[in-house]
Image (cartoon, grey):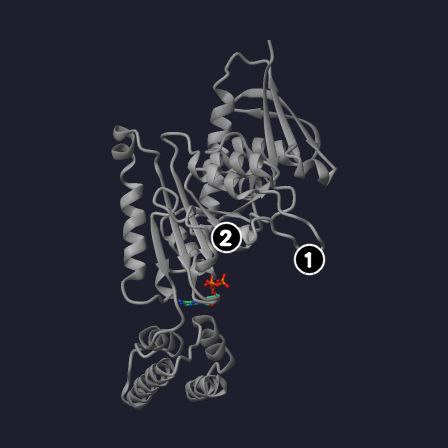
Amino acid sequence: MAHQNKLNERHSIFMSRSHRLSVETTVHERKNGSSSALFNLVAGTGTHWLKYRGIWMQVVRERETQSIEVMSGTPWETVTLTTLSKDRAIFPKLLTEARDLALRGQEGKLVIHTAWGTDWRPFGQPRRKRPLSSVVLDVGIREKIEGDVKTFLNRRKWYADRGIPYRRGYLLHGPPGSGKSSFIQALAGSLNYDICLLNLSERGLGDDKLNHLLSNVPERSFVLIEDVDAAFNKRVQTSEDGYQSSVTFSGFLNALDGVASGEERVIFLTTNHFERLDPALVRPGRVDILEYIGDATPDQASTLFERFYGTDIDLDVKEEGRQRELEEQGQELRFIIKKGGEKGRTISMAALQGLFIRNGGSSRGAIEGCQEHFEVQK
Ligand SMILES: Nc1ncnc2c1ncn2[C@@H]1O[C@H](COP(=O)(O)OP(=O)(O)OP(=O)(O)O)[C@@H](O)[C@H]1O
């Protein structure tokens, strides 16, 4: 009897949550017999024959054309493998090999998944990881969150032994451009985790789909839900064109709570408006760590300044003068921010970054720009 295996695919082939295959990587990386088999497998739509580990298989690759079907959760592409061989293990072997090749291609990269119907799918190309140290937070915040996440990830058995759902929730709140999203992405990258980015106001997302998505997060992924206040501001959100989000607040809470025991789940929520959140959302079990990520402090500003203008370069005698100048400018920047803060004036880290980029080679220009920024604030 023929054995058949059906794989759902879109850009990548999905067999199960842990078997993610990136087709292109497979195609380009290997030229031996088995990978040319994989090449054939994905070479185009239609019917192919391939020989893998001495076994012939028929590969039928079909593509759905209706994007509407994607939204309803129907696979975008289907690959069906059929073989007359008795060796059933050939499918997992083939998939494992392709997955390993694909994962090798993603090493050092951060994959962002977004929701497609009821599935998570990689969005765009894997991105270069951002070093965690490049996101400069106020003293101790990075260590606190990073330490908590690592502790959590090492305690699976502890949770299982006590029958506690293995989940952890983090809420980062604070003004725009303070580094909330950048930090979460950098943290995920540093731990070799992916990000599943969820927009609660997305068209077509209802309570059931949300529940399904949150219960089927790919392995080694953090869920990131940004601007969580927006979806439930006035409980039902209406977008510019009149579309109303159909995720209800109680549906969201249920989805947060309803993790199957043993399944790991790490959720990061962000908001600019903590005061708008319903207290029910921010209780332990849903949000375990709550952290304010604010505008630039004098310390953060001078650290970012140093990173941009580099005070730790190897110095020869000529550069020593420049080094001293940068140190003085760093102090000046701290002073400007401290004085501004005393008058209730602030600058975001994103705005500082923008100033530094605009004043590329001119550290003096950046300091002056910052001074101006504070002067124009009432
Ligand atoms: N603390 C920071 N350290 C380094 N860069 C930062 C920091 N905060 C912001 N940036 C830079 O500013 C830009 C915007 O940051 P990000 O999107 O992470 O802010 P956010 O707090 O998530 O904003 P929002 O609340 O609007 O979503 C990024 O390019 C990032 O590099």
Residue, disc 2: 228
| Element at label 1 | loop
Asked which quadrant contains residue 135, the reply is bottom left
User: Where's residue 77, x and y in %?
Assistant: 66, 34
User: Where's residue 161, x and y in %?
Assistant: 25, 29
| Element at label 2 | helix
Which of these two is toward me, 262 or 269?
269
Can residue 226 be seen here? no
Quadrant for the N terminus in the image: top right
Residue, disc 1: 240
**Between discs 1 and 2, the one toward the N terminus:** 2
Asked which quadrant contains residue 84, the reply is top right
The CA distance from mark 1 to mark 2 is 18 Å
Question: Would you place residue 80 above or below residue 248 in this image?
Answer: above
Can residue 302 be seen here? yes
Q: Residue at x 38, y 37 (%)?
A: 264
Q: Residue furthest right?
A: 66
Which of these two is toward me, 234 or 231?
234
Which of these two is toward me, 204 or 186?
204
> On the rendered structure, is 85 left or right of 138?
right
